[in-house]
Amino acid sequence: MKDRSAVIIVRDEKLLLLHRTKGNNKYYSIPGGRVEAHKDETPEQTAIREIREETTLCISGLHELCRFENQDRMEFYFIAEKATGDAVMSGPELAKATTQNRYKLEWVPLPKVRKIKLLPEKIKEIITDMMDDGKG
């Protein structure tokens, strides 16, 4: 399984998340995607590419927040200092969406992050810990 990069984007005290519906399973995730190792892509390059493809946003000032293994792959999480443009669902996710497999971008107020199903749980813990420390 390919490694994954994802980007934490906060604007106006809201976190940009991908709201997923797979049949009866509903959850949120941090926008991102698979590293294209066959193209010698770095996790940071993946983060920039995937956010542009998936959300149409241009991001800059990336800082790696953490990395950990999840479901037999490495996941890299970055924080973007700046994101320009309007977040609009695009790319492969938009093309493969069906009534049973939906993708929707949502700006979730930071306090609400504690109450939603954000996967993987480990990144939810890291984000809420940052909020508790006054860094998020």
Image (cartoon, helix red, strand yellow):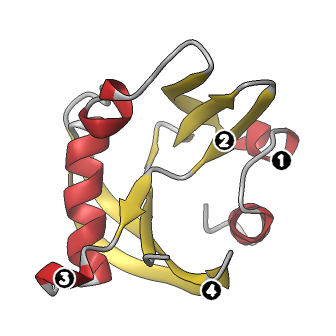
Asked whether the beta carbons under mark 1 and mark 4 sit within 8 Å of each other, the answer is no
SS class, disc 3: helix
Q: Give the mark toward the camera: 1 or 4.
A: 4
Residue 68: mark: 4
Residue at x 72%, y 55% (from the top left corner) = 119
Image quadrant assignment for residue 72: bottom right
Q: Which residue is mark 1?
A: 114
Image quadrant assignment for residue 129: bottom right
Residue 38: mark: 3
Mark with earlier residue (1, 4): 4
Amino acid marked by disc 2: Tyr
SS class, disc 4: strand
Q: Give the mark toward the camera: 3 or 4.
A: 3
Q: Which residue is mark 2?
A: 28
- Direction from residue 42 to residue 4 in the image, left or right: right
Mark with earlier residue (3, 4): 3
Residue at x 81%, y 39% (from the top left corner) = 116
What is the C-alpha distance between the residues marked 3 and 4? Answer: 21 Å
What is the C-alpha distance between the residues marked 2 and 3? Answer: 28 Å
SS class, disc 2: strand
The answer to whether one can see residue 27 in this image is yes
Decide: is 44 above or below 27: below
Q: Give the mark toward the camera: 1 or 3.
A: 3
Q: Position of residue 92 (x, y in %)?
A: 29, 38
What is the C-alpha distance between the residues marked 1 and 3? Answer: 37 Å
Amino acid marked by disc 1: Arg
What is the C-alpha distance between the residues marked 2 and 4? Answer: 18 Å
- Direction from residue 3 to residue 68 in the image, left or right: right
SS class, disc 1: helix
